[in-house]
Amino acid sequence: VHAATLNRHDYFTLQGVVGYPFEPPRILGCDAAGVVDRYGPDRPPDSPDPGTPVTVYPVTFCGACARCGAGDPMLCARFTLLSDGDREGSFGDYLVVPAHCVLPKPETLSFAEAAALGTTYLTAYRMLFVKAALTPGQSVLIQGAGGGLVTAAIALAREAGLTVIVSSRSAERLETAQRIGAQHGVLAGRDAAKKILALSGGGVDAVIESVGEATWATSLRALRQGGI
């Protein structure tokens, strides 16, 4: 392991808020990038050679249940991230993962940048382009500027040609969000939904909601009829 990221999931595990009970000690860490050291038996023929810089796909599924067979393994009952269940995490010198979970690191990315692609960027990508199925020209409200998921969602949404509106209680975070790609920033509060409706011409096509109760009412009011 050359780089690993810190995610809220790691804090949840420390607080005992986990989906899979485990017995300590446990190595935390949900993401990693590094260099392939070696393989066990039955190495897949198309896997990166030892010594190859790679980024790690942090999720595993059973591959045998009805949900996996239906084409959406993220709903697998045995879905696990690194550090879940019996899996050790990435905050160590070495990490053991299934061979299909190592992918060649893009040469343009540092190890730290490549490590950040897993939990945040894959989650943001799934929300924007799998669940919401957004296409260029559509609009999205992203709640809670400042976090890793929101930062990833802004970058991906803007690159995909979406109109990006970000909401936050912090004017400073809104300025940062606009600097990295959001076209509009709206201060959270009583009038936020009205402003978002005006900016979007009657409601956004989708909302990325990762905050919860504090922003839920605004998220619903700002969404167009039939939005996601």
Image: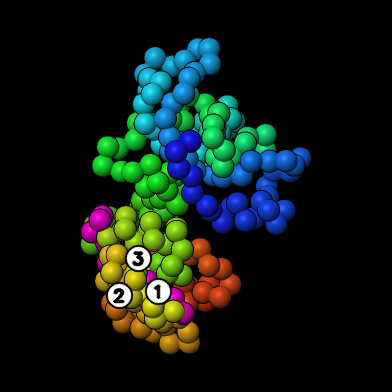
Rendered position, 128 above or below 62: below
Give the residue type that dot 2 points to.
His
Give the residue type that dot 3 points to.
Val
Q: Which residues are magenta?
A: 159-169
- Disc 2, SS: strand
Q: Which residue is mark 2?
A: 184
Q: Residues within 10 Å of mark 1 (few under 14, many from 20)?
A: some
Q: Which residue is mark 1?
A: 173
Per the model, the C-alpha gap separating discs 2 and 1 is 12 Å
Q: Which residue extends farthest bottom?
A: 191
- Disc 1, SS: helix
Q: Which mark is residue 140?
A: 3
Q: Residue at x 68, y 47 (%)?
A: 19
Q: Is residue 81 visible?
A: no
Q: Nearer the viewer, residue 109 or 189?
A: 109
- How far from the left and from the top, in percent, is residue 143? 44, 69
- Disc 3, SS: strand
Q: Is residue 95 visible?
A: yes
